[in-house]
Image (cartoon, rainbow, N blue to C red):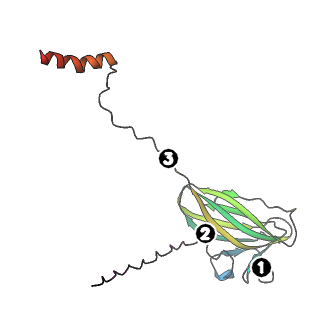
Amino acid sequence: PTPTPTPTPTPTPTPTPTVEPLMLDPDFEKGTQGPWVFSGSARVETSVVRSGVRSVRLPTRSVSRVKQEIVLRPNRQFLLTCFANNNRELIMSVLVNGEEIARSESAPGDSGPAWTERTLWFTTFRPGVYEISLFTEFLGFVIVDNCSLEEQVFIPTDTPEPTPSPTGSPTPEISPNQLRRQLVLPHRRSLR
C-alpha cells in the first residue's frame, strides 16, 4: 500500500501590531474640527499644502497659534517635526503644567516659497498632558503641514546597580605544596 502523505499545516500569519499615533491629525486635514486648538489669527489654509487638502496659516498680526494636548509617558525622548513654508518663522514649543520644557527658535531670514523641515527634540521627565504649540512672533507668516511626534529612546531613570553574587566564607589561598600535602599525606597514613 502507498502511504498517505500527511498534510503540512499552513502557518497562520502573525498580525502586524498597530501603533497608535501620538499626535492626532498631524496634517491638519480636519481643520478647526480636529484636535488642534486655533487662536489669534491662525486659520486653515487650502491653497498652499504639502500634502492632502489642508494646512495651517499662522499670520503675525497677533500671536497666531495652534496647539494640541497629548498624554506622554515619562523618561522618554521625543522628536517633533513639522514642515514650514514661506517665511518659516515657525516656533515650536512643548509645555507641561504651563512650564515650557522645549522650544525651537524661528528662522526669520529663511524665506522663500519652499517647504522646510523643522525639528524639536524634547525629553519627558514625568507622566502627564503635554501641550504641543506651533506659533509665530515676527513679521510675515508661516504655513505649516505634515507634523509628526515620535518617541525615540527610552531613558532609564535609575542606573541599576550590579547584583552581587552570593559569597560564602572566603576561601583561603593554598599553595600547590600545601594542597599536595593535604591530598597525599592522608592517603599515606591510611596505607600504613
**Residue, x 80% and y 65% (percent of image)?**
137
Kind of element beneath mark 1: loop
- Sequence-wise, the earlier of marks 1 and 2 is 1
**Residue, x 74% and y 59% (percent of image)?**
104
Tell me if residue 60 can be seen.
no
Whole-Å distance between the Cαs marked 1 and 2?
23 Å
Task: Name which residue type carries label 1.
Answer: Val
Task: Name which residue type carries label 3.
Answer: Asp
**Category of crowding for the residue at label 2, using alpha-carbon neighbours closer than 10 angstroms: few (below 14), some (14–19), many (at least 20):** some
Taking the magenta stretch, the answer to whether it contains residue 4 is yes
Query: In the displayed image of the protein, which residue is found farthest to the left?
Result: 192
Name the residue tied to disc 1.
49
Q: Nearer the viewer, mark 2 or mark 3?
A: 3
Query: In the displayed image of the protein, which residue is found farthest to the front?
Result: 1
Name the residue tied to disc 2.
69
Magenta extent? 1-21
Relative to 114, is 173 on the left or the right?
left
Up-down: is 35 above or below 175? Answer: below
